[in-house]
Amino acid sequence: MWIYCVDLRSVNVDCLTLGQYMQPTKRHLKVVEYVTPAKFKHWEEVGKSLGFLYTASGALVRSSYKAGEFFISNVVRKRKEALPNV
């Protein structure tokens, strides 16, 4: 997984979303592995360390799930943190 994240950054991808497949019905593919919250947190930190502007990582995260809202709020928060304290 790490190498895929590095590849994405190498082509200037700024937003990374990582989620969990949920089997919608018994006729769909079975879930092979339950990804723990700790693993999602780990991959969120990996995304940050690789320089993604925004990384959403969690069981219910979807690439389209409020992506724009989360991205903008994250950019605004980072800009506020970078301002000198007046």
Image (cartoon, rainbow, N blue to C red):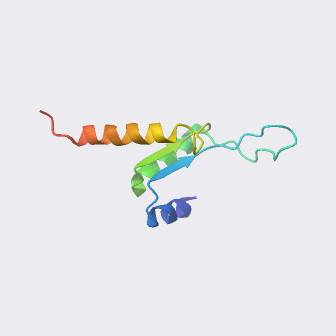
What is the number of callouts on the image?
0
63 relative to 2, above or below: above
Q: At 55% from the left edge and 40% from the top edge, which residue is drawn?
A: 38
Which quadrant does the C terminus fall into?
top left
Q: Residue furthest front?
A: 68
Name the foreground residue: 48 vs 80: 80
Q: At 40% from the left edge and 50% from the top edge, which residue is drawn?
A: 53
71 relative to 4, above or below: above
Residue 36 place in picture, x, y as percent? 61, 40
Residue 16 place in picture, x, y as percent? 50, 51
Residue 49 place in picture, x, y as percent? 40, 53
Q: Is 84 on the left-hand or right-hand side of 26?
A: left
Quadrant housing residue 60: top right
Q: Residue furthest top?
A: 86
Residue 71 place in picture, x, y as percent? 43, 42
Q: At 50% from the left edge and 62% from the top edge, which residue is drawn?
A: 8
Which quadrant does the N terminus fall into?
bottom right
Q: Residue furthest right?
A: 27
Q: At 42% from the left edge and 57% from the top edge, which residue is drawn?
A: 50
Name the foreground residue: 43 vs 63: 63
